[in-house]
Image: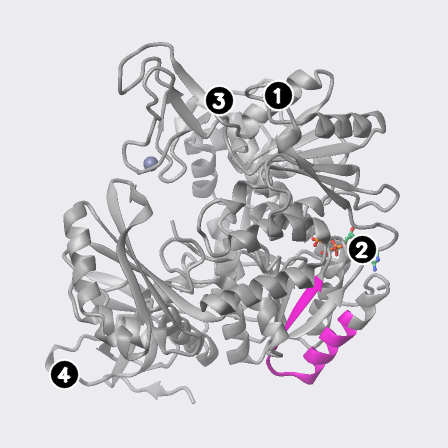
Amino acid sequence: MDRVFAAGERVGVALTEPLGRALTGVLDYRAPEGGCGTGDFVEVPLGPRRMLGVVWGPGTGDFDAAKLRAVSRVLDARPMRAELRNFLSRAADYTLTPLPAMLRLATRAPGLGEPPGLRRVYRLSGPAPNKLTDARLRVIEALRDFGGASVTLGELCEAAACSSSVVKGLVKAGVVSEDEAPRDLPFLDLNPADGVTLQGDQVAAADALVAALAQGGYGTTLLKGVTGSGKTEVYLEAVAECLRQGRQALVLLPEIALTAEFLTRVEARFGARPAEWHSGVTQTERRRVWKMVSEGRAQMVVGARSALFLPFQQLGLIVVDEEHDTSYKQEDGVLYNARDMAVLRASICGAQVVLASATPSLESWVNAEQGKYTRLDLGARYGTAELPEMRAIDMRGERLASNRWISDPLARAVEVRRAAGEQSLLFLNRRGYAPVTICRACGHQVGCDHCDARMVEHRFLKRLVCHQCGATKPVPEACPSCGVEGRMAPVGPGVERLAEEVAERFPEAKLAILSSDLFGSARALKQRIEEIARGEAEIVIGTQIVAKGHNFPLLTLVGVIDADLGLQGSDLRAAERTFQLMRQVAGRAGRSGDRQGLALLQTHQPEHPVIRSILGGDEEAFWRAESAERRASGVPPWGRMAGIILSGPEVAQVFDFGAELARRDGPLRRIGAQLFGPAPAPIARVRGRHRVRLLIKADKHAPIQAAVAEWLAQLKPPNNLRIAVDIDPQSFY
Ligand SMILES: Nc1ncnc2c1ncn2[C@@H]1O[C@H](COP(=O)(O)OP(=O)(O)OP(=O)(O)O)[C@@H](O)[C@H]1O
Ligand SMILES: [Zn+2]
C-alpha cells in the first residue's frame, strides 16, 4: 500500500540525477505543507539547486533530523505507480545502474508538473510560395518534418535554425497558422473491431495470443515467422484484444525510420493514430504522450526502447518487433537491453510480451526451447509469396578488376531483373565511400586524432569521418606521415563507392542509395523509401537499414556484396549476427507473390558452416548447433557475462586501476566467476580517452550483479576515471 506522509514527516525521495556510484540516490526530506504520498513527483532542494524526484517511501532516518530540509513542492502529475517504481528498482539492480539514472529515463518529459493550460502552436496552413528565402524554406521543411503535429515557436525555431521573426513573417504571409491549443490533447480512440482475415498458421497464432491475454497475468511468447509471414498482422490482433480489455499496449520498433510506415498501418487497422515516442518526437508531443499515458488516455504507444519507461496505468501487452535487433541494446549511458527489460516490466505488472522475429536471438530461442517462453511459428509467407531462393557466388572463381566488387553472375542477374521491370538490391554493410584511406608512398592509413580508429571517406560530404566520435577532416593532399603529395588513395568499398561501380556498369539504370548518414531527416528517408516502394529505382544500394522490415513489392533480387564481412573478428555473436542479417536482407526479395525472389551471396568461403546454414535454410539446425557450441564454451545464453570498461585521459592510470581491480577479485572468485583482463579495448581510444576492458564470465545462475557490486565497491576510482558496467554485453568494442 502506498503511504501518505503528514507535513514534517520524514520521507525518502529518489532523485533524478546521480550523486556518485556509492549512494542509492534516495535522500531524506521532510514532507511539505499539506503532506505527500509515496510515488508523488516532487521538487526538492539539493545544495543551491532544485531537483525533480519521486517520493520513494519513508525516510531511512540516518540523516540528522535538525538538518533535514523540506520538499519544495508536490507536482501536479499522477503519482508514479508502485509497479513502475518496482520496475525501476529492479532494472537498476539488474544493470547495476544508480537509481537516479534509471529514474531519469522515466521522467524524460518536459514540464512534467505544469498545470494544463493553453499554448501557441504553429502548423502549415497554406501552399508555399515559389520564391522563398533559405530561412523560410527551412521553417516549411521543419513543419513538414513534424508531420502535421503542431509545434511551439521555440521548437520550430530550433528545428529550422532561424529567429522567431522568420516564423512570424510566414504567419503574416498566410503560409503558417498560429493557434491557441490546449496543452495536451487526449489521443483518439482506437477501434479494435475488423481486422484482416487471417490465414493458415496466422489463425492459431493469433488465437493463442488472444487467449493468453484473456487469461490474464504475465507470459512471454516468441512469435517466429519467416519474413513476410504476417507477424505484424498477428500481433496487431493481440493489440486489439488488449484494447478490448481496456488496457494499454506498447509496440517497440528497432528503428525510427520504420515508425512512419507502421503508424500508417496501425491507423488503417484501428482507425486512428496511436501515440508515438522516440527521439524524433517534439518536446511538446513528448509531454503530451507522457501525460496521456499516465492518465490512461493513450491506449497504444509505438516507440523506441525508451518507451518502456513511460508511466502506463494498465499495461497489458508489450510487443518487441524484430526482437533480435541489436539496437534494443542501449550502448550509451544506462546500458540496458530493452528486450529483457520488457520481459521484466511485464512480469511485474502482469502483462503479456510478444517477441516477434524471423530470426530470433539465440537467447529467446533457448528460452522457448526450455519452455520459459511460449513459441508460435508462422511457417510460410502470406498469400502466394514464396521465400527467396538463396545461392552463393564463389568469389574465388571470379576475376574482378581492381576496385570492382560486383561479380559477373551478379551483374547478369541484375540485368535480367531490369529487363523484367523488377528491382534489385545490392547490400553492403558499410557506410561512406571507402573504409580506409592509405598513402601509396609509405603505407600510412589516416586515423582519427581522438580515437584509435581509421577514418572513413565520405565522398558525399567530401570529408573523412570517424565512425566512433564523429570527428571529420578533409581528405589530405599530402600524406600526414611522410609528406608525399598526390599518393593518398581510398581502399575498399563503402556504399557510395559501390554506387560508382553500379553507375558505370548500368549507366541507364535509376539508382537509389540508402544509408543512414545520407538523409538529414527521418522524413527525407521515409520519402525515399516510399519512392523506392513505388518502383522509382531499378537498383537500390543499401546498408543494414534496408534489412529492417521494409516492404518493396517490386524487389526480386538481393545481391550481398560481401557475405563474409560479419564473420571476421572474434565477437561471440558473429555467426548469429551474420545469419540474422543475411536472412533478413534476403527476406526483402520476392514479397509480392507473383514474382519469385532470389538472393545471391558473394563469398570467399562458401563452405563456411555459417554460410552453408544461411543457404541451406534449415534454421532450427543452425540454432541448435549454435546453442550447443555456446553451451560447450559456457558463454551466453548458457553462461553469464559482464563487461567493465574503464576509461580515462591517461593510459597508465587506467591500466593501473584495472590491474588493482584484478588483484582484488575475491568477490568474483567466491561465486566461481572468472575475470579476464585488464586488456586494451579493441578500440583502445575514443574521444581522447583510453579504454581498458575487463570481462567477467560466470555460471548461468551465479549472482553476478551482487558480486560485481561488491568487487567494485572495494576501490574508489580516481576522479577522471570512468567505470561503465555492462551486464550481458552485446558488443565488445
Ligand atoms: N491475413 C492477411 N490478410 C491480408 N494481408 C496480409 C495478411 N497477412 C499478411 N498480409 C500482408 O502481407 C505482408 C506481410 O505481412 P507482415 O508485414 O505482417 O509480415 P511480417 O512477418 O511482419 O514481415 P517482416 O518479418 O518482413 O517484417 C503485408 O503487406 C501484410 O499486410
Ligand atoms: Zn574519432
Amino acid on which the number 1 mark rests in the picture: Glu
Q: How many marks?
A: 4
User: Is 618 covered by the magenta stretch?
Assistant: no
Of callouts 2 and 4, the N-terminal one: 4
In front: mark 4 or mark 1? 1
In the shown orientation, is residue 733 left or right of residue 449? right
Residue drawn at x 37%, y 81% is 38
| Cα separation between marks 1 and 2 | 34 Å
Instruction: Residue 249: name its quadrant.
Output: bottom right
Residue drawn at x 51%, y 20% is 133
Amino acid on which the number 3 mark rests in the picture: Arg
Q: Is disc 2's CB within 8 Å of ligand 1?
A: yes
Residue drawn at x 37%, y 87% is 3
In the shown orientation, is residue 72 left or right of residue 604? left
Q: Label 2, on which residue?
A: 381
Of callouts 4 and 1, the N-terminal one: 4
Amino acid on which the number 2 mark rests in the picture: Arg
Does the residue at mark 4 contact the one at mark 1 (Cβ under 8 Å)? Answer: no
Report whether residue 627 is seen.
Answer: yes
Q: Which residues are magenta?
A: 205-224
